[in-house]
Amino acid sequence: MRINSVAIIGSGIAGMRAAQLLVEQGHKVTVFEKSSGTGGRLASSKLGEGSIDLGAPIIDANDVEFESWLREQGVEQWFPSNATLQLEKRKPISGWVMAPRSSALTRQLAGGVELRTNVRVAVVWPDREGVLLRDAAGEALGHFDAVVIAAPAPQAATLLDAIQRFRHRAEKTAVSAIWTMALSLPERPAVLADVDWLEGEDEVIARVVRDSSKPQRSGENWIIQATEAWSQQVLDLEPDDVGREMLDAVSRAIGETLIPENVRVHRWRYARATPEQGHENALWDEQSGIGACGDWLCGGNVEGAWRSANELVARILGSRLKVA
Ligand SMILES: Cc1cc2nc3c(=O)[nH]c(=O)nc-3n(C[C@H](O)[C@H](O)[C@H](O)COP(=O)(O)OP(=O)(O)OC[C@H]3O[C@@H](n4cnc5c(N)ncnc54)[C@H](O)[C@@H]3O)c2cc1C
């Protein structure tokens, strides 16, 4: 198999890390993304005059290789002051955040890539000319020597129709939803004067994070994340109703009523994956040229998605070296 052109479906960390490695090796890479910007669950969103990180609020690095890659990309270490939802102080936590917003990380990995946003790929099918992609209207998007599917498991499943064993793996992966609320406040609440991160035992609220405490941010922007169990219970409610309940729950916990200036409520339908243990961290079918990577195959987090992309690209390059 001679691999030159590669299509990547999904511009989250897995897709864009795969793109970075393939571009470095001289491949012609096209990334298809159904949204208007890059990032996936590391995306940022407009809020009032500014922007806010709507997905993962922090990146954990457990491995030195990943940590040194984050440093190379200019991702900064962050030590938010930490408390329970009832405002009992805890030891500070640490992690990594991109400045000035989290989507800047995947955006900068797009160098040398043809990035096609607002395109939802609906069909991935191998034929004599390579792997054919079609959009939801049935229009051909082109033939490629290889295709990397870097979408969350439920969305990857339909795209993996040509390789049934891969499709089954995607279908078997558990993925939970998380409701998230972004809000800007006129000023910092007095009770939260020295707290950037709240987390604790609560039926409704999992985390409250001061986005404005991250490097190169301004304003008074906060993120509230609901628990996975509660998000599942209210999965199909209207965003306004969900937001009202989340705001009430936070106000109750901290003992102060929050009155936001701007609000955005977002349902992450496929927020957190639980990868099956004891399986490969990436999927690659050399015969068809179709592969998959992402957090649902490794770790269930940003680091795992990055690792999965590394493993998939190593296997794609291995095929090329063996046969080309
Ligand atoms: C609220 C929340 C909090 C989180 N907290 C943390 C945390 O604290 N620490 C941590 O490490 N991780 C956290 N995570 C998980 C982390 O964000 C993900 O594990 C990681 O970002 C997944 O990356 P990915 O590239 O595998 O998938 P994604 O980021 O989901 O990227 C997939 C991309 O594929 C696109 N796509 C899907 N289908 C198609 C299609 N048919 N055609 C074109 N494009 C398509 C999507 O639009 C998306 O952009 C959190 C996630 C959420 C939602």
Image (tube, grey):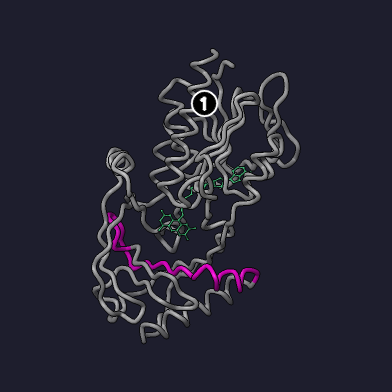
Work out which residue is located at the far front of the displayed protein and give it.
278
Image mark count: 1
Q: Is residue 157 left or right of residue 43?
A: right
Specify the quadrant of the image occupied by residue 123. Answer: top right
Report which residue position mark 1 lands on.
Answer: 316
Q: Nearer the viewer, residue 142 or 305?
A: 305
Q: Nearer the viewer, residue 315 or 38?
A: 315
Vertical placement of 10 versus 3: above or below? below
**Residue 59, x across and y down, in percent:** 36, 53
Q: As drawn, is 89 to the left or to the right of 286?
A: left
Say which quadrant the C terminus sits in: top right
Mark 1 falls on what kind of element? helix
Question: In percent of the image, x 38 and y 74: which residue is there?
Answer: 200
- Residue 290's spot in the image, x, y percent? 61, 31
Image quarter where the N terminus lies is top right
Q: Which residues are magenta?
A: 212-236
The picture places residue 171, in percent across and down from the top left corner, at 65, 50
Does residue 232 show up magenta in the picture?
yes
